[in-house]
Image (cartoon, rainbow, N blue to C red):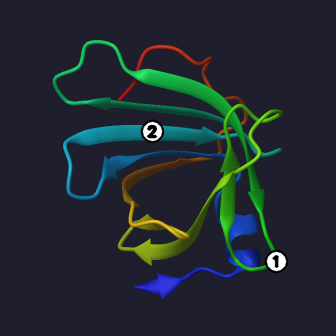
Amino acid sequence: MQMLTSDDLEAELPGTHLFGHLMGSNISFDECIEPDGETVYRFAPESAEIGYSNPGQMVITPLAQACFSYPPDNDPNPSCFRVFRYGDGYVFDAVGATSRFVVTKVLRGIDICPDPGALIS
């Protein structure tokens, strides 16, 4: 897998809607990232009728990490990831943790994300 640089992340992640799963689990997620970095993150086990949904903010660091804060104004410890190209998608590898999020579907050209709420597919 090829790790993306800060320039790659700035060029590729804003304006996308990402769909995938937490590696080693049955937890699906999607994250919509507007061009300004505002996000909507959602996840749920496959059997859940109601999932978790939260607005956030993504920031790309000079260390080639995509960092996400939820909620965007009050999160003192953002979740930061190294991002690797993985086929037509990505793998988000948590910095300082063992979680990996595998993105299997990417929609591009997103201007406005859906409001936080029910999971979409």
| Disc number placed over residue 30 in the picture, else none | 2
In this rendering, the answer to whether 1 lies above or below 92 is: below
In this rendered view, identify the residue nearer to me: 76 or 40: 76
Kindly identify which residue carries mark 1.
Answer: 62
| Disc number placed over residue 51 in the picture, else none | none
Residue at 40% across, 85% down: 1
> Residue 55, located in which quarter of the rendered image?
top right
Check disc 1 and give the amino acid type: Pro
Task: Return the residue found at the far bottom.
Answer: 2
Seen in the image, is 56 located left or right of residue 31?
A: right
**Quadrant placement of the C terminus:** top left
| Mark 1 crowdedness (10 Å alpha carbons): few <14, some 14-19, many ≥20 | few
Check disc 2 and give the amino acid type: Asp
In this rendering, the answer to whether 75 lies above or below 3 is: above
Coordinates of residue 46 in the picture (x, y in percent): 19, 30
In this rendered view, identify the residue nearer to me: 71 or 49: 71
Of marks 1 and 2, which one's residue comes earlier in the chain? 2
In this rendered view, identify the residue nearer to me: 10 or 99: 99
Coordinates of residue 106 in the picture (x, y in percent): 46, 51
Q: Classify mark 1: helix, strand or loop.
A: loop
Residue at 70% across, 51% down: 77
Seen in the image, is 34 located left or right of residue 62?
A: left
Coordinates of residue 104 in the picture (x, y in percent): 34, 56
Seen in the image, is 24 located left or right of residue 67?
A: left
> CA gap, disc 1 to disc 2?
25 Å
Coordinates of residue 53 in the picture (x, y in percent): 51, 24
